[in-house]
Image: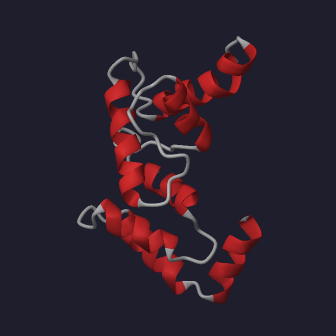
Amino acid sequence: MKIKFLKGIEKDPEPFRNALINLYDPSVDVETKFNLLTQVEGIGPFIAIQFIASIDKMKYCVISEDVMEAMRNLNLADAVPTKITTIDDYLYLNKMCIKLSQYFENRFKFGLPIVHSFLYHYNKYFRKKGEWL
């Protein structure tokens, strides 16, 4: 993946340059940012989500397959996709993370990464091994 991403940038850096310019422009909507990022050769939805989450940790969360599996196992929603393929999938799950964040003491302003960390560790360790790491 890393090599494909780097080769894509090397081959044609303009789509990546354009995506980065627009990523931190507050006048550009998140859908456009996602679409620009996924147009870069080697950047799929998951990598695009990581870039988007870097914009504002209080507003956007990295949502991995482990996080989605935890959401399903905890019955946090009627339907949790197995894979994020569109911005709508991401925004739906991100909205759940925002709602969950109100249940966490977040006195150091970690933002939504605290929700990601909880769900990831719940799925990866607690659910499978019965212990928190």
Q: Nearer the viewer, residue 5 or 20?
A: 5
Instruction: Provide residue 22's location: percent of width, then percent of height.
Output: 37, 71
Q: Quadrant of residue 132?
A: top right
Does residue 114 appear left or right of residue 126 in this picture?
left
Instruction: Provide residue 68's location: percent of width, then percent of height.
Output: 53, 38
Instruction: Provide residue 74's location: percent of width, then percent of height.
Output: 49, 22
Q: Which residue is drawn at the image coordinates 38% and 66% (left, top)?
A: 33
- Image quadrant holding the C terminus, namely top right
Residue extending farthest to the top is: 130
Q: How is the image coloured?
A: secondary structure
Q: Which residue is drawn at the image coordinates 32% and 29% (left, top)?
A: 99
Disc tally is: 0
Vertical placement of residue 43 versus 122, above or below: below
Q: Quadrant of residue 46?
A: bottom right
Q: Is residue 55 visible?
A: no
Residue extending farthest to the left is: 27
Q: Is residue 6 visible?
A: yes
Residue extending farthest to the front is: 78
Q: Quadrant of residue 123?
A: top right
